[in-house]
Image (spheres, grey):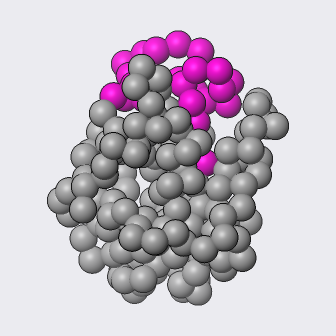
Amino acid sequence: MPLPSPFNLPTPAAARALLGARLIHGAIAGTIVETEAYAAEGDPACHACLRRSARTEIFWGECGRAYVYLCYGLHWCLNVVAHEAGKGGVVLLRAISLEKGIEVARARRRRDDPAERLASGPARLTQAFGVTGAMNGANLQHGDFRIELAKRPPGRVACGSRVGITKAMRKKWRFWVEGHPAISR
């Protein structure tokens, strides 16, 4: 089912709403269990906050698109464009509980990790799902690479500070399904 208008909410609300949704890419699928919100305005932890550029223009674009970037020159990170009208923002997908394609994920990661650790953390997630920079801007509302929204809440949701940032650390914009074994550490 396509991403509906609720993803035109403030980015933190969209980050919470994505919990329980499923990410699908070909033979691999799983439930989103951890996210972080990044707002283009007023959030110095967001790399679009300082200025709009060709690279960050997608933050203000159509909700439900993928924003994929290379972190520290090493790992791809997958975000979903999600914001209210006139604002810009993305939701970083931090962890997914794999349900389908576990052996595919293990082969892509070249590791024999337990299933709950294969897509736990942004870099592991993109490796497991085969996400690359070529997917930047992809429409996640339909097709082989898509998000299907949850029909019911995922369980108890916790929130706290985002991981690995040095600015805006007091914002409680990290959301996760409490007690889930796939949460990043």
- Which quadrant, please, contains the C terminus? bottom right
Residue nearest the observer in this picture, 31 or 151 = 151
State the count of labels.
Answer: 0
Residue nearest the observer in this picture, 136 or 175 = 175
Residue 105 position (above or below residue 170): below
Give the residue displayed 34% in from the left and 75% down from the top: 28
Residue 42 position (above or below residue 72): above
In the rendered structure, which segment of residues is drawn in magenta?
A: 36-61
Q: Find out whether residue 59 is within the magenta segment.
A: yes
Give the residue displayed 72% in from the left and 76% down from the top: 179
User: Farthest residue in the right direction?
Assistant: 170
Q: Quadrant of residue 101?
A: bottom left
- Which quadrant, please, contains the N terminus? bottom left
Residue nearest the observer in this picture, 127 or 27 = 27
Question: In x, y percent, where is residue 70?
Answer: 49, 41
Question: In x, y percent, where is residue 159?
Answer: 72, 55
User: Farthest residue in the left direction?
Assistant: 143
Give the residue displayed 31% in from the left and 52% down from the top: 3
Q: Find out whether residue 22 is within the magenta segment.
A: no
Give the residue displayed 58% in from the left and 20% down from the top: 41
Q: Is residue 71 left or right of residue 150?
A: right
Q: Is residue 32 left or right of residue 100?
A: right
Question: In x, y percent, where is residue 35?
Answer: 58, 54
